[in-house]
Amino acid sequence: MKNVEKLLRVLMHGAFYVASASLVPGCSVSIQFDEADLGAGGMPEVPEEPEEPGESDVPITDVPAAEGQSLFVRNSDPGQNIAGFEFCCAQYDTYQEHGFTDAQGDFIKLDGGFWGADIAGHIGERVFSSYGDGYEDDTDTTAAQLGPGATGEISSPAFVITKDYINFLIGGGRNRFDGVNATAVVLIVDGAVVRQAHGNDEENEIVWTSWDVRDLEGQTAVVKFIDHHPNDGSDTAVPYILADEFRAADKAAVAPPAASKVPATPVLSAAPASEGASAFTRVGNPGQNIAGFEFCCGGYNTYQEHGFVSTGDIIRLNGGQWGADIAGTVGERLFASYGPGFADDMGSSGVDYGWEATGTMTSPQFTVTTRYLNLLIGGGTNAYDQPLATAVVLRVNGKIVRHATGNGMEKQLSWVSWDVSALIGQTAVIEIIDRHDNSASTGAYPFILVDEIRAANKAAVAPVPSSIVSTAEGHTQLLNLDMADANPYYENGVYYIYYLQNLGFHSWALAKTSDLLNSTFPQEVLPASGDASRQDQFVGSGSVLKAQDGQYHLFYSGHNADHAPVEAVMHATAADNTLTKWTPVAADTFSGSAGYSDFDFRDPFVYWNQSAGKYWMLITTRHSSQAAIGLYTSTNLSNWSAEPPLYVEASPLNFEVADQFTLGDTPYIVYSDQRDASRQVKYLQQSGANWIKPSFDALDGKWFYAARSAGTAGERLLFGWVPHTVGRVDHAGPDFGGSLMVHQVASLGSGALAVSMPQRIRDGLAAIQPIAMEWSAGGVSAIGTTVNMEANSAFTLAELGVKNRMAFKVTSANAGSTFGIQLRREISGQPDERAFLKIDASADKAEFYFQGEEGAASNPKVAVPLDSSDGIDIEVLLDPVAGVGAVYLNRNRALSFRLYALANYQVGLFSNADGLTVTDLSRYTK
């Protein structure tokens, strides 16, 4: 028994090498250890811990439900068994009316103990359930089950620990209090968590557990109930917590688990700079110490070239900064959120970015394999959830679970350690945050310094409990993706935006959204290998589908210019229902055959064709030297047969990311024309057995590309990207990759396909903003929401730094009038900078251009039927954070554009030779 106890202590210390120990005849326990922890004779090296008196002889009761006494009581009614949750029906805030405290989130709604008839193992009639019955507020009179999406916290009445053990029943989710999506019960003494418990993914079942509290006798404590799992599909754990019958006793219900003690004594390293290994590595060059920032001098975008996802000014930095004047630096370089960089990727001379620089940077993804993460940190002390944050966070499943700030020193680094033993085996990233632009004094340095992020089984310093982040909120971001091709999937009201990362080898990432304004934090879900000998050195576009048998599949492109074939279709299946973990099926890889090219063979779009009784796969390829939307069919998603192409055309370039869907009774194919002169998202209509080009076949201009759709017949959305410019500066031409833009598609009565602003964006941006002119020229007069404009006049409304939308109708006596939207930036002492979206009803077209650049080949343009005398309904979407916008004309066509400095531009209208009437002018934000 003594060896078993020792092995359990090793488990508590976070090791992971497999061993087995006999407990009783016929039973065993499998425990994991790291080989590095093994000592002589193959036994684990275990930090010696004094054995508490009687530790090996825990007395176990035969009747835990009757052993001892209720752990806590209601002062006003000590006889009521609130520790067994035998109370209910006081409606809203029932728990706090019965002596519980600090109810947060949905827990204040709970109507007391939940009827336990369907909960296996319950004692008495009722249990604690985080999904139980409740009321929305104190005026609500109808109880309803809150459901598994409910989250919150609540604490028991305080009590004094007078017995050796605390016994209770627990069930539900498996996530620890210090893990992601916590569903746990903890014991708190003097504000600190000293014991913890959680379920083991029991659904509607509770089992006994025990805490050994002999060392806490005489101290005052509370029990806190935690459910931070919003049932958002981010893991496979049961998303609720169940508990019952908390009792103080001199005998345990079961042997107290070693892991129930918090915290375990930290094991400290004498040499943290060399302890363990780099927490993450660079794909394609794992030997380079990017976790120590030992790289530089790649010019603009150096960090992304080394596998980091960067935003803001950090994308301009020139890699790890020379660390000679920063005390505590390991190696030669470190990360600083200020320093030398380049304004754009066309620059040859550097720019020094000072403390005003801001941005974020996310590490390559890695798996947590050790008990600790150690890192050096310095600079500002504003926490991650502050507006001017200077912080570092650890994210698991996209959610923040650990955090640290700088040490408040300008030129000195200090070690920080996070205990991540609760996260072993999970996938994580490090995010470095600097939101402090040095425009306001907060008493903290406006930058962050980081160096040498290492995974180790020994801590650099003792982890502080406050580094743990456990909350249901605060993990999302604005839906602002720097991306290449989108490959969306829709299910149960949520859009899964799979997309190619706009860096490295274009691994697949995922962000989920239900409102098109906010999203989950992006996670890498399908990595490219980066291996020059493999088909998937680079990965490309594809599609996700749920097969007829309920299994999820992902088809994608593998690209390697030095491989034969150069391009191939590859296949993966979902490891679980989170749709974030995919297992490649190498045997299913195939390339072009039967006249199809194996050089251009990519972008598989797979769907079930009900009428054909088969799965269809649309392919970007070439057939008999023509651009083709190819077709393969399958009955099992593993074996594919080449069929004649659906559409071919003589073209030197291809029809990319084809997508098929049906609205009403009309089937459509949407594709992206790769030719420079007509690089637009277009569509085909089916006519009999043929696919034909309609009039006005382009849905948007050339600054919206690689769009694919997802949704339902009632709401189908088209996800594409607005390209960055070369150098990411205004006035330059388009580059590869860009910012997300979403349109809603609809079938018109004529059968033509149309695009408009998504209704979800209209619903989300619904706060009315004042309509007040900031500037006008010529004859402009306004009454309420109507503006009358004489010929050659203009006006603008104020600039806004947040996403906003406008709506209005423009009418002119001349059916072919020319007018448009004007964006105007005032610059002190200099002429205004202006951009225009010109609407020419006489030519049925619209064009975006900067002043003096009308007609340039790179300007986005779109053709659309227009008649000013009938009135033209216009909606405008402006996203200053992403630096993009779109104008929607008659809910028919869109014109997307790039304007990095959009936050500084006023927006309004201009007229040319004809007068205009603008009616129902309105503006909205979130």
Image (tube, rainbow, N blue to C red):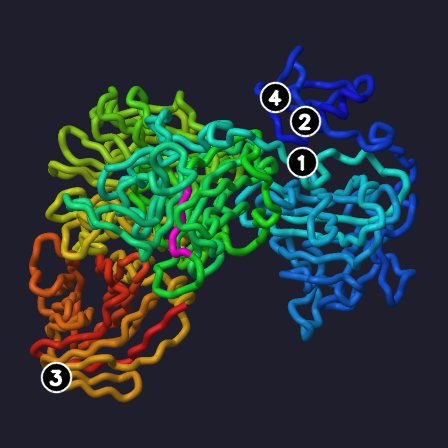
599, above or below 254, in the image: above
Task: Give the residue displayed 53% in from the left and 39% down from the top.
Answer: 577
Left or right position of 648 against 428: left
* Mark positioned earlier in the residue sequence (4 or 2): 4
Amino acid bearing label 2: Pro
* Residue density around tag 2, few if under 14, some if 14–19, many if 20 or more, within 10 Å: some
Q: Considering the numbered disc 3 on the image, is that residue within a helix, a strand or a loop?
A: loop
Between marks 4 and 3, how big is the CA–CA gap? 81 Å
Circle number at residue 47? 2
Measured Cα–Cα span from mark 2 to mark 1: 9 Å
Q: Are marks 4 and 3 in contact (CB under 8 Å)?
A: no
Q: Are marks 3 and 2 in contact (CB under 8 Å)?
A: no
Residue 600 seen: yes
Secondary structure found at label 2 = loop
Between marks 4 and 2, how big is the CA–CA gap?
10 Å
Residue labelled with disc 1: 265
Closer to the N terminus: mark 1 or mark 3? Answer: 1
Q: What number is the disc on residue 37?
A: 4
Q: CA distance from mark 1 to mark 3?
A: 76 Å
Q: CA distance from mark 4 to mark 1?
A: 16 Å
Q: Which residue is mark 3?
A: 778
Q: Which quadrant is home to the C terminus?
A: bottom left
- Give the image location of residue 689, x and y in percent: 25, 41
Which residues are drawn in magenta? 445-450
Dot 2 and dot 1 residues touching (CB under 8 Å): yes
Q: Amino acid at mark 1?
A: Thr
Residues under labels 3 and 2: Cα distance?
A: 82 Å
